[in-house]
Amino acid sequence: MEITFLGTSSMVPTKERNTQAIYLEYKGEGFLIDCGEGTQRQMNIAGIKRNKVRKILISHWHGDHVSGLIGLIQTIGNIEGDQEITLYGPKGTKECMDHLMHSCIFENKLTLSIIELDINNLSTVHETDEYKIEAIPLEHSVPSLGYSFTEKERRKINMAKANKLGLKEGPFIGKLSQGKEVTFKGKKITPDDVSTILPSKKTAFILDTQICENSMILAKDADLLITESSFASALKEKAEEYKHLTAGDAALIANNANVKKLILTHLSQRYKTPEEILHDAQTTFPNVEVAFDFMKVNI
């Protein structure tokens, strides 16, 4: 799983920071969390193929989080082959997307499925054998969602051990990796004989909210928490006015939710360097970084 920060500014882009977008790739499948203005150009610079995007997770419908959608949809639609994208968003997403798709003239060539999440608590919105995506409502000035991506625990085959038992790549290895016992040359082989269990890995995304109970619920036990940090604690009143998090708030969430690592994004344009935001968070939660455009993280 690799995460690329495509935009780390808040409402106003700067020379160093584009508006909000995060790209997550898992085994060749692309997930885009928000899509601010200029996101597809940021993808070009980062060397990310736009046709890998299969799911778009919209936190809320403020312009700095969605203004890049129409261009991205148009570009992906022009790529050869049948392109399909599923877009998730909070209550009101279907109406907003309808307006957006009629905001300019173009031929939509891709299959776009829109799933509006009118939910009240932590909910699984998509799940496969390998991962699940959860969403939860947060508290912002408009309907807003936080998301988490969890890679499920899985077995990793130790091929050296398997080879000693005469096993090679094939159906026996496949069954063992699924946790099933096999019989090979008259001998029973259990999954534990040739494999180990890799624990699940969870990444949580909290974008635009004031501190609330649901932010703690979403972040609980995350290996990585990526959260907005529009202001330092010195501007706590401004953060509360606009229903945003300070760096101190983000650190408090990480600390109380037993998070392993914290990365801060969505910085106000007033912060020319990240030091004040970083030091503010470090007073509560030491394992923290401030994201920058094109930063990559492997989970």
Image (cartoon, grey):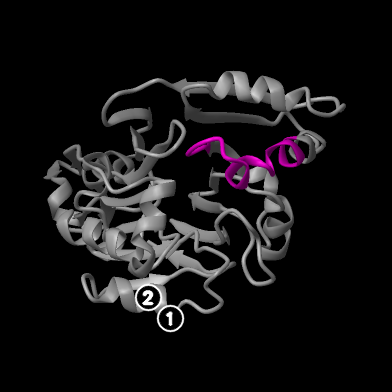
* Disc 1, SS: helix
In percent of width and height, residue 277 lies at 40, 72
Report which residue position mark 1 lands on: 275
- On screen, residue 295 versus residue 255, left or right, reads right
- On screen, residue 29 versus residue 72, left or right, reads left
Q: Residues within 10 Å of mark 1 (few under 14, many from 20)?
A: few
In percent of width and height, residue 298 lies at 42, 65
Quarter of the image where the N terminus is located: bottom left
Quarter of the image where the C terminus is located: bottom left
Question: Label 1 sits on what residue type?
Answer: Glu
| Res 198 visible | yes
Q: Nearer the viewer, residue 166 or 73?
A: 73
Query: Pointers 1 and 2 in contact (CB under 8 A)?
Result: yes
Magenta residue span: 57-73
Report which residue position mark 2 lands on: 278
Identify the mark at residue 4; answer none if there is no mark: none
Question: Label 2 sits on what residue type?
Answer: Leu
Q: Nearer the viewer, residue 224 or 166?
A: 224
* Disc 2, SS: helix
The number of numbered discs placed on residues in the rendered structure image is 2
For the point 28% across and 55% down, the residue is: 157
